[in-house]
Amino acid sequence: MQELTSTFMSRSFLPTTSPRLQMRPRSLVCMTVCMDQSRKEKVVVILGATGTGKSRLSVDLATRFSGEIINSDKIQFYNGLEIATNQITIPERCGVPHHLLGELPPDGELTASELRTLASRSISEIASRGKLPIIAGGSNSFVHALLVDH
């Protein structure tokens, strides 16, 4: 974990050896999330515009550092919008578990507080299995609600 923290804390983007990535996400941050007063979990956050390779990078990192991915794209929370949201396909996931992806019906609603609760639970569950939680997506407000407003 120390290698991961020191590597990502000092860079605004991560060069990658993956030939599939033509553009790189502009924001890759390693953060500590306080789930309660007595326990902190380390997470990696990947933010960027549509089509910049966040999904591929998150899978590459999860594979390398034994992680699981938590979706932070608000629209991708909804089921049935896979094509419209360019959701990562099952083969592209390479066996890496993904959380909060396609779990709500299209007519469902989710408040920032509910998102925070679901994501916090996912982070805790992933960390309890000794895995690295990786938050990936393009919804800055979701990440802000999870990491700052919490």
Image (spheres, rainbow, N blue to C red):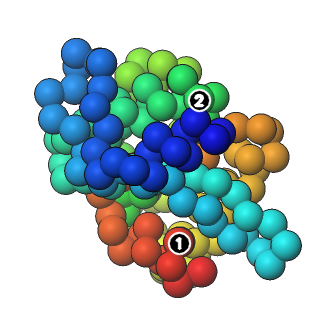
What residue is at 22 percent from the left and 26 percent from the top? Answer: 21
What is the count of numbered marks?
A: 2
Report the quarter where the C terminus lies: bottom right
Res. 73 mark: none
- Figure check: 140 above or below 20: below
- Figure check: 147 above or below 65: below
What residue is at 63 percent from the left and 66 percent from the top? Answer: 33
Residue 85 seen anywhere in this rendered image of the structure: no
Q: CA distance from mark 1 to mark 2?
A: 21 Å
Residue 23 seen anywhere in this rendered image of the structure: yes
Res. 147 mark: 1
Q: Quadrant of residue 58?
A: top left
Residue 93, percent across and down? 45, 26
Earlier along the polypeptide chain: callout 1 or callout 2?
Answer: 2
Q: Residues within 10 Å of mark 2 (few under 14, many from 20)?
A: some
SS class, disc 2: helix
| Left or right: where 22 falls relative to 32 | left
In the picture of the structure, the residue carrying the numbered disc 2 is: 65
Q: Amino acid at mark 2?
A: Phe
Pick out the residue farthest to the right. Answer: 38
Q: Quadrant of residue 47?
A: bottom left
Q: Are marks 1 and 2 in contact (CB under 8 Å)?
A: no
What residue is at 44 percent from the left and 67 percent from the top? Answer: 143
Q: Amino acid at mark 1?
A: Leu
| Left or right: where 59 falls relative to 81 | right
Which of 73 and 24 lies nearest the eye of the viewer? 24
Residue 70, percent across and down? 52, 49
What residue is at 53 percent from the left and 72 percent from the top? Answer: 147
Residue 62, percent across and down? 53, 31
